[in-house]
Amino acid sequence: MTKASPAELYAYVKQNAPVIENYIETLAAFGSQPEGGIVRPVYSTQWFDAHKQLAAWMQEAGLEVRADAVGNLWGLSRGTEAGQGYASGSHLDTVKEGGKYDGALGVLAALTAIRFLKELYGAPRLPLEVVALCEEEGSRFSKSFLGSRAITGNMPVEELDQSRDADGISVAQAARNCGFDPDQLAAAQRTDLAGFIELHIEQGRLMEAAQVEIGVVEAITGIKHLRVVFEGQADHAGTTPMDLRSDALVSAAQAVTKINELAREFGRPAVATVGKLSVEPGATNIVPAQVEITVDMRHPDPATLEQLKQRIVQISEEAAAAQGGSVKIDLLMERQAAPMTPEIVNMISSSAEELGLKNMPMVSGAGHDSQVMVEKIPSGMIFVPSCGGRSHSRAEYTPIEEILPGIALLAQAFYRLAY
Amino acid sequence: MTKASPAELYAYVKQNAPVIENYIETLAAFGSQPEGGIVRPVYSTQWFDAHKQLAAWMQEAGLEVRADAVGNLWGLSRGTEAGQGYASGSHLDTVKEGGKYDGALGVLAALTAIRFLKELYGAPRLPLEVVALCEEEGSRFSKSFLGSRAITGNMPVEELDQSRDADGISVAQAARNCGFDPDQLAAAQRTDLAGFIELHIEQGRLMEAAQVEIGVVEAITGIKHLRVVFEGQADHAGTTPMDLRSDALVSAAQAVTKINELAREFGRPAVATVGKLSVEPGATNIVPAQVEITVDMRHPDPATLEQLKQRIVQISEEAAAAQGGSVKIDLLMERQAAPMTPEIVNMISSSAEELGLKNMPMVSGAGHDSQVMVEKIPSGMIFVPSCGGRSHSRAEYTPIEEILPGIALLAQAFYRLAY
């Protein structure tokens, strides 16, 4: 085996930029919409065509290809020694209308990194694998992280039949339609991996603002979602003086304002967002009787997240009381923060330094397969920038010059781990 | 003609409470829903059945009955002398789901007042008429005040064919289906009335709060409706720090709060209401990009109303700018305030004093047929209380004891005007 230099590897990645661009554009054609944007829900024709294209590329790269019980697609670069190997990848499905990079870029980064390493240095000492995870977004079935939960043994077998899409089709049935064998769910579990690295676009503007090439993810944030329902009293907007009203929207407006101020006071990385608000009865000339909002709050520290939640509950109660109304609050969802594995994080970070890449530690504000993988497999994430932070949208974009550092970094980390 | 005393008249009205209650309950059955509430859009079967029932009652009371071109139903108590007469009434149609009193009570009050006067004192000196106006609410066709606009010559003939309901049926066609002759629209105009009085429920809680029996309406308020669209930027709720956002809902919330405070500062009778608010894209985990609100503002003084509007525009612009967003503002609707005719207002007010009724001057915050009638015919309004201010709802309620003073007042005013 030739002794590699980081500079040589980076130069090779740059030289192969057209290969990467071709992968990205070809994959983006599966599910692409006339107005732009990509619709590629798991197990759909578009998704399955993309899956087959990826399998063909893996084979061309000399990898051993297989799909597991739920359709995670694996491409193995077999090691010359016995030992646990490393995998990299991300997901192939999109949100309801997504872009070219969310998920897909992580799969193609893994494919190209492993392919380029093989081309430069031959077979690795320890096994390296590309994985195209079958589903992350939860855009077809309501539960997300289908692929990574199958791999880590966290997918209940009942879910195969019970989880159904809008047409009533079960996960099992949809998977069988693509030729997978969901009865083999248990066999999809991987207990033989030494590590997992996921490359992903940032989906935010922090890297752009800081002008760095690489985000080294130290943790994926924790999330709580509340539903807050403010109850007031419907009244005629013309005949009810201001001082006799109990206006649920005035309560909700006060809560929205104060929740925003609260998250600003907490400071980065705390965020709190009211993304949905609906008014009943919702007529121009009727004082609102009921307003329902959702509050999405995130923080990587569980105690701080809980404190945020408690303050938001208090704000909501005060806002309702100020209008003589009442409030009902439900916890819709909570997901614990997931710290990445320090050894993997350090490996990514020192590899970035070796390559001379401007990098910074980050907390991922969005959820990713790595938060599921890390429950069983040492894991880390590499972020590359997102233009304007655009994501989950046809406007999602990362130019090739900002992708190359990420792929070089993944290759360099894999070189150090497996060559 | 017997010389009447107000006490005798009031006693007769009270003694006939069961007659009034029977009218109210019988009329309420037309269009009543299993869960309560009344659905009686103009020209519907339910409405036409109510129309026929009223015509029968008018005939029983010895009135000369006719329906005009658009279906306003008139019942005339012919005068013994030549001269212009007086009319009273309100509308027979309901909002999409209304109660027993809005409109209907004004028609039945006119019928009973004229009937009782006739029973006590025989034919009037000047003509007295009951009118059941065919449409006020605009719940079937988008333009309201159909009946009173036909009577005052303010209904364009094109509207008969151009104004259509949700099924595409025109006003003319629907009117013809009930046997009316809309081609005679011009003949529906009345230029021979000396005055019009409308009795109506308050639809608010001011009378309840002041513990008065009668509201003497001095003006119907002016209204402006604005549509305000706040534009921000959609962003991922997890990956976009608070300080990099342009959240359209935070702008809208600030505007809702400040509009509410503004109307409180202006004081009664100023009101301003945000009754509708919609969020785009409206997902739990996306920072709102666009929020549309409506603002309903009312004041009887045109200059103050305009000042309210200008302050609301300014508040909206500031709220958008505070989040780095923009705003678009449209005037959706404006209706000038309508002062009632002083002679009629004074007549109502002095008649209330003669009857010993606790009364107070009021501004109507809601629109009424009288605002159209007053453009051509001297007009005034009598309010009776609404329990809890409930209106435009199945919960609408006024007990018979609170209705009797209103009917006695209407009868006393008519006695003074026409006997």
Image: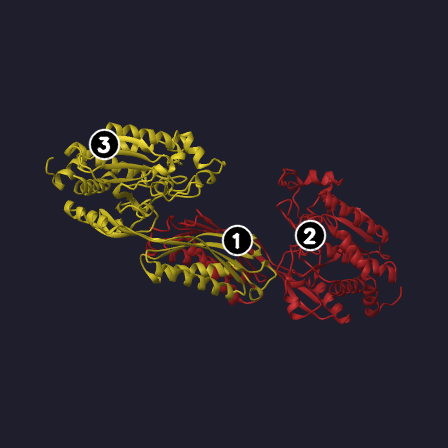
Chain colours: A yellow, B red
Disc 3 versus disc 1: nearer the observer:
3
Q: Is residue A195 left or right of residue B122?
A: left
Q: Quadrant of the C terminus of chain A?
A: top left
The label on residue A19 is 3
Q: Earlier in the sequence, mark 3 or mark 1?
A: 3
Nearer to me, B246 or B38:
B38
> How much space separates mark 3 and mark 2, taking CA atoms?
70 Å
Circle 1 marks a residue in which chain? A
Q: Chain of mark 3?
A: A
SS at mark 3 in the image:
helix
Q: Which mark, by number, is residue A279?
A: 1
| Marks 1,2: beta carbons within 8 A | no
Residue at numbered disc 2: B36
Circles 3 and 1 on the same subunit: yes
> Where is residue A223 drawn, in percent x and y?
38, 53
Label 3 with label 1: CB-CB less than 8 Å: no
Left or right of B199 in this view: A163: left
Report whether mark 1 lies on the same chain as mark 2: no
Label 2 crowd bin: few (<14), some (14–19), many (20+), radius 10 Å: some
Q: Residue at x 86, y 52 (%)?
A: B60
Q: Amino acid at mark 2?
A: Gly
Can see residue B286? yes
Badge nearest the viewer, 1 or 2: 2
Q: Amino acid at mark 3?
A: Val
